[in-house]
Image (spheres, rainbow, N blue to C red):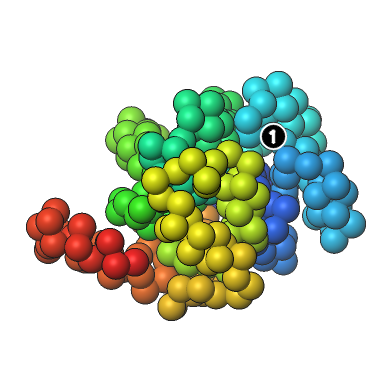
Amino acid sequence: MSPDTLGKEIMKQRNVIITGCSSGIGRFVAKGLKEKGYRVFATARKKCDVDALIESGLESVQLDLSNSASIHSAFEIILQRTGGEIYALFNNGSYGQPGAVEDLSRDVLRQQFEVNLFGTHELTNLVLPVMRRQGYGRIIQNSSVLGFVALKFRGAYNATKYALEGLTDTLRLELVDTNIHISLIEPGPIESRFRKNALAAFKENISVERSPFKRAYKRLEERLKTEGSVFPFTLGPEAVFDKVLHALESKKPKSHYYVTFPTYLFGYLKRVLSVRMMDKVLNKV
């Protein structure tokens, strides 16, 4: 197939799968891409969220990243609807489990990895053979500034995002001789329901009264309960959408996309500061 013919074929079959579309970044990107002419499959874990997405005019399929059967079922439904063509996958679905590392049980940490890494990996590995067969594709991973710097009480989330970055960088190297492009989005603070969901996970899985961090947890809980922005330079989900669109449409998409000033700042500081000095900075956040 010539480059011109391939380009026309890609434009004709711009089917995109997005995970974690119940709110925030996923929902905004799904709506934005639909307006741009993409055929978007906006997935969500809960049926009520799938119903709401359909009511809003999006195609939606139920997909629970912690459940292999759900991942395979959703993928098969999407393949049937698209005739087996997938242009892109935006792995956006994840959640944050707050808590000090020593307060995280094995089961709690495993659940964080099931959603944020293992489910994402499994879905990616279902999509890759399709992209290899058709000769093109884009895979975009929504990571975080916490995928390359660590913050207190975010150990579980940090661990999954660090792992996602390592896995994605490796995948990009392995696909260098293909027309499948791999990109990482690394947002800082973005307006979403992330804190609300993190608060629910914190209350369910962390024993505040038995922790040596009891006093610090009180402050953490207050911040998680706060409505609106709690960090300077917080941006709306449209900032992530702009990066996703570039990763989808550029002939040479970037391997890493920073989003928000804190991401650029910490990326720079990590390159120029010693570990000791960087720790001092991070302990003040």
The part of the image, by quadrant, that contains residue 273 is: bottom left
The location of residue 162, given as percent across then percent down, is: 35, 42
Given residues 174 and 261, the one toward you in this image is 261
> Which is more toward the observer, 88 or 186?
186
Which of the 4 image quarters holds residue 177? top left
Residue lying farthest to the top in this orientation: 69
Residue 139 at x, y percent in the picture = 50, 43
> Would residue 151 be found to the left or right of residue 108 on screen?
left
Residue at the spot x=48%, y=30% of the render? Answer: 105
Give the quadrant of residue 126.
Answer: top right
In the rendered image, the quadrant that contains the C terminus is: bottom left
Residue drawn at the location 38% of the way across and 37% of the way down? 102
Residue 31 makes an appearance in the image: yes
Viewer can see residue 11: no
**What residue sits right under mark 1 in the picture?**
64
Q: In the displayed image of the protein, which residue is found farthest to the bottom?
A: 232
- Residue at the image position 85 percent from the left and 47 percent from the top: 48
- Hey, which residue is sitting farthest front in the picture? 209
Position in image of residue 75 (x %, y %): 70, 30
Q: Is residue 130 above or below residue 24?
A: above
In the displayed structure image, the side of residue 254 where residue 31 appears, left or right: right
How many numbered tags mark residues here? 1
Q: Report the amino acid beneath label 1.
A: Asp
Percent position of residue 91, x then y? 55, 44
